[in-house]
Image (spheres, grey):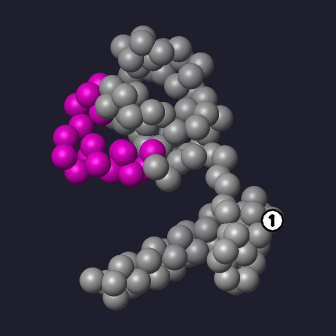
Amino acid sequence: MTPLGKRLRELRSQKSVTLKHMADELGVSSAYLSALEHGHRGTPGWLMLQRIIAYFNLIWDDAEDLVALARSSDPRVTVDTSGLSPEATRLANLLAANIADLPPEALKRLIEALEAELREAAIKQE
């Protein structure tokens, strides 16, 4: 399941709607929505995201959060490290080779550490 898929399932649960009902309202198949939730489809396009946002009546921060989740929910990630440092290539390969075996707690720590580094780098650039 992708971060977007997890959030869609939460929103459906809060609204007490079935996958089929939501699919009918959005004009897509329930198979498509199921695949989207389970990470078997790539991220939805901008128009579909807007339809989902309208369906759940999301505004401002909630809508922006959903769009951000969609951006980080591509289940088929490719990392091109050509031209980057050897450390970047090593990191990408270590992650690719081992991500399936990492426990959820380790993934959470890695995400938090990377996000902290990115925030620090952004502050230094300002």
Direction left: furthest residue: 60
- Camera-side residue: 21 or 86? 86
Q: Position of residue 48 (x, y in %)?
A: 40, 28
Q: Which residues are magenta?
A: 53-70
Instruction: Confirm whether the magenta stretch covers residue 65.
Output: yes
- Camera-side residue: 74 or 126? 126
Query: Dividing the picture into quarters, in which one does residue 88 lie?
Result: bottom right
Judged by its main secondary structure, the magenta piece is: helix
**Residue at image point 38% right, 34% down:** 46
Q: Is residue 72 positioned above or below 38 on the image?
A: below
Direction right: furthest residue: 97
Which residue, given by chain and number where applicable, does mark 1 sit on? 97
117 lies left or right of 76:
left
Query: Dividing the picture into quarters, in which one does residue 119 lie?
Result: bottom left
Q: Is residue 98 positioned above or below 118 on the image?
A: above
Q: Would residue 38 be seen by someone viewing this image from the given angle?
A: no
112 lies left or right of 97:
left
